[in-house]
Image (cartoon, rainbow, N blue to C red):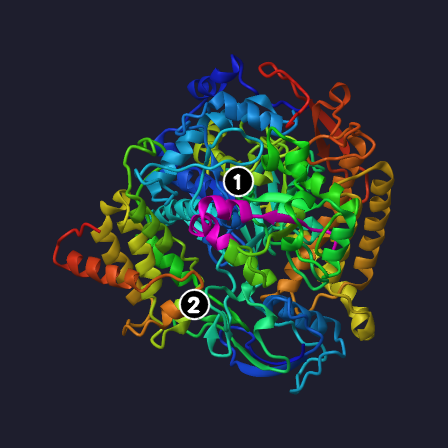
Amino acid sequence: MKFTLHIWRQECSRAKGHFETYKVDNISPDCSFLEMLDILNEQLITGSTLTSHLSPSTSPIAHPVCFDNDCREGICGMCGLYINGRPHGNDDGITTCQLHMRKFHDGDDIWIEPWRAKAFPVIRDLVVDRSAFDKIIQAGGYISTTTGGVPDANTIPIPKHKADMAMDAASCIGCGACVAACKNASAMLFVGAKVSHLALLPQGKVEAADRVKKMVCKMDELGFGSCTNTYACEAECPKLIKRQNISRLNRHWIASLLGRDRNS
Amino acid sequence: MLDSKIPSGPLAEKWTNYKNSQKLVNPANKRKLDIIVVGTGLAGASAAASLGALGFNVDIFCIQDSPRRAHSIAAQGGINAAKNYQNDGDSVERLFRDTIKGGDYRSREANVYRLAEVSGTIIDQCVAQGVPFARDYGGLLDNRSFGGAQVSRTFYAKGQTGQQLLLGAYGALSREIARGTVKLHERREMMDLVIKDGKARGIIVRNLVTGDLERYAAHAVVLATGGYGNLYYLSTNAMNSNGSAAWVCHRKGAAFANPCYVQIHPTCIPVHGDYQSKLTLMSESLRNDGRIWVPKKKEDAEAVRAGKMRANDIPEEDRDYYLERRYPAFGNLVPRDVASRAAKERCDAGYGVGTGYAVYLDFADAIRRLGKDAVEQKYGNLFQMYQKITDENPYETPMMIYPAIHYTMGGLWVDYELQTTIPGLFAAGEANFSDHGANRLGASALMQGLADGYYVLPYTLQNYLADQINVGKIKTDTAEFDEAENNVRQRINRLFQIREPLTSHPSTLTSVDHFHKALGKIMWEYCGMARNTESLNKAQKLVSELEDEFWKSVFVPGTANEFNPELEKACRLEDYFELAQLVIADALHREESCGGHFRTEHQTTDGETLRDDDRFMYVAAWEYQGHGHPETMEKEPLNYEHIQIATRNYK
């Protein structure tokens, strides 16, 4: 298969970015999207003639396109590209590394951009800084236990459906697609998932009210936008995190303002 | 002389005895002591969180943009613990025995026993942190079985156990960061270890965003940087997982133990093209319900490979469930090394499917027995992952799998306290060699990482640090730091120097990946699932030729002072060349087969590993002698006082 790639290039956070156009050819449909970018980079590094670099470039050998990636099996949350206007591209329930070229048509033009959000500044090309997510978790996205001195794991039975709901919320990989998908760059799905995961478990209830307040305040402080309930986040989440987590976040938030601890 | 520092007393009392007699640091003094932890996987995050909570000042480093992305996150199946919640006869003793046997009697008794002993508490800790383990309808924790065990002792959270355990540890770590006891340094790669007066006193890291070299000092350094499986290029490891942090410590004097013990995981999605960047694991838990087979008739296998026949066309009587046939007692749940070799044997004999290097993992029976919904509940995300990659529906047609490099049992040599041969340098998790012998059992890596971080290091580090309370703050403006930083700078400059003459002849430019792929192919072919003197000698020669070629024609674009992934890869590959030679040398010297190390000259008549306990019942700890010089080896004899040594038998 062959493709024309329009890729956002930006040297560093302070530089002005622009799109560059590249062509790749002979791509197997079984190739993953990131492997296709590996092939492009190999061509850029070796100056191979296979790539006709359409727009003028200042250096004779172009710097390879930078993009974050690590596990390449959809679990680490490191990769994240905005592909033809969709976070993680045109497939459901996957990360960019799980997108395969068979999902495209031969000869397609593909537009590749980094996550766009004030709270996620670009580091280089398609790489963004998502440390804002870590800061939200540090504000309270945990249960305060220290190592040791905990009861036996089976001391508190947890109803299976509650445990399953907590698991579903906990499966968030922190990739940032929800923020990228949102027109306001809101982080409500990310925060909602963590608030829900912990509030659904008896162990997490103790700090639930305090947690939701601290996490929401931190989210606002870091420049994430407001939620207007359009649920683009839910539609694009690679782990299919549900919007109900946002509702649960809101319920807990309101209850915490009223000084009440909600039970669920 | 290696001193493993195994405490005296009966095996079951050693750890208690150690804790009762070790030195402690009082709370006021803890505040004066600094600890560096490199790596934020299960071992690193749990160690940093626990040490921070105790009151030490911890600096923690990761190469990713967030500590939550360390490769522990990719572990799917579960974590072992001797809880005996199932009333099926499990105990600390049983988990200990299974682990020793699974490791083919090549691990240290005292370490393994301690691991089994603390395993139960890990589950308690994780539940308290909010890890959403699978539960039954009564609300209690559920278990499943893994290879090499006849009990169900594996706790799991869907197919994402590693992720959930890591998020638990990351939560604990985040809390300590918020409390100010731990300082996080993300997108930093350790480039060198700084030693002062014979003790590990700091590290040099490269800031991966700016390219700056930075200095950090401490009273002790903990390395929790994982394994070196990516030496083989195609593996189940993440792209950025690498062996360099451990390797720079080895260069500085830390002994490296049993490098040839590399685990090949039997159930991975097979290789399908040259452009492929990694192999995806399909959890071992699938072997609970999936049955592995190949066609009984060669002509059927050929027809399947040619696309003239499909798996479902082959009638039951023409299928060879070779694991159930060869190992009736353990069936599809034999340990990983055994299952991998059996798959290779069938494929080499011409019965492979797909490209010829694949076997079937079939769920038809399980779906009939349990229903599709139940199978989906248990393995849904794995099935989805498989379908996305291969474009085939595993509910309807059997999965195709083949073994791939997965884990390295070898690593930095550590004593009972997890201290390396450099005082003050500790190694935890996959980065050390200590607990798995020649083969690791499934669901034991998570157990070991968390055991080391939550329950071992917080004790043993104190025993070391108790003598450091009067040392005072370690400074970074010393000659030792200058020298280490200069060395790193020179190493990086050298990589850019080779490219200067190349740029005038663009046709000679070769990428780092090109060399890494070539190295991986050599290692897989000649030092992979089966090795012998001839293949290893060949590997030695090929690796050395490839390394020469690398230093002539590798092209690293950009500069050292910017975000430059190609430079990162080049630095790691440079270390892999040396590491490869050590893996080969270790494999050559160990003239026996054990666990993941299979020397074709040493096998039983029915193709099983043949150990030579008289000659090789020891840990091989290698010492660096300079680039291009053969390393010297010191032996740590393995004394089995408690366990009866036997031939590993899963039949």
Which chain does the numbered disc 1 sit on?
B
Front residue (pair A93, B194) = A93
Q: Position of residue B637 (x, y in %)?
A: 68, 21
Span shown in magenta: B355-382
B372 falls in the magenta region: yes
Quadrant assignment for the N terminus of chain B: top right
Q: Secondary structure at mark 1?
A: helix
Quadrant assignment for the C terminus of chain B: top right
Q: Position of residue B298 (x, y in %)?
A: 78, 48
Q: Residue furthest top?
A: B9
Q: Which residue is mark 2?
A: A177
**In the image, is residue B354 above or below residue A149?**
below
B512 falls in the magenta region: no
Characterize the local packing of mark 1: few (<14), some (14-19) or many (20 or more) Cα atoms within 10 angstroms. Answer: some
Mark on residue B81? Answer: none
Q: Main secondary structure of the magenta part?
A: helix
Task: Give a yes or no on whether discs 1 and 2 share a subunit.
Answer: no
Question: Which of the 4 image quarters holds residue A154?
Answer: top left
Q: Which residue is mark 1?
A: B288
Amino acid type assigned to the residue bearing label 2 in the image: Ala
Query: Going by the image, does A247 lie left or right of B215?
Result: left
Q: Position of residue B327 (x, y in %)?
A: 65, 31
- Residue B228 shows in the view: no
Depth check, mark 1 against mark 2: the one in front is 1
Residue occupying image coordinates x 36% and y 32%: A148
Q: Position of residue B608 (x, y in %)?
A: 74, 30
Amino acid type assigned to the residue bearing label 1 in the image: Asn
Query: Going by the image, does B490 lie left or right of A15?
Result: right
**In the image, is residue B489 above or below residue A27?**
above
Front residue (pair B552, B470) = B552
